[in-house]
Amino acid sequence: MGRSKIVAIITGAIALLLGFAYLLLVQLLDFRGDMVPAPVDVSMWMSFWV
């Protein structure tokens, strides 16, 4: 095998590993559940108490 073929195989393997790592990361982040919006501004609630 020539040097360029070895470099191509190593580069392809790295690309596949990065692709699988990305898919795993997306699955883990998606597994956390629904996204909850940020809390409403507190100053709005203070107007009810005054």
Image: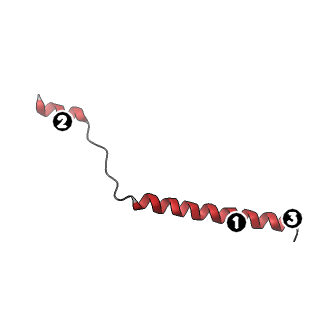
Label 3 Cα neighbours within 10 Å, binned few <14 / some 14-19 / many ≥20: few
Q: Which residue is mark 1?
A: 13
In this rendering, the label closer to the viewer, 1 or 2: 1
Secondary structure under tag 3 reads helix
Q: Which residue is mark 3?
A: 3
Q: Amino acid at mark 3?
A: Arg
Percent position of residue 23, x then y: 53, 63
> What quarter of the picture does the N terminus occupy?
bottom right
Q: Single out the residue that lies furthest toward the bottom.
A: 1
Image quarter for residue 14?
A: bottom right
Q: Nearer the viewer, residue 31 or 45?
A: 31
Measured in 3D between alpha carbons, the distance from the residue under mark 1 to the one under mark 2, in whole angstroms, is 55 Å
Image quarter for residue 46?
A: top left
From the viewer's perspective, tell me whether residue 42 is left or right of residue 13: left
Percent position of residue 32, x then y: 39, 58
Q: Residue at x 58, y 65 (%)?
A: 20
From the viewer's perspective, tell me whether residue 18 is left or right of residue 49: right
- On residue 44, which mark appears? none
Image quarter for residue 31?
A: bottom left
Q: Amino acid at mark 2?
A: Trp
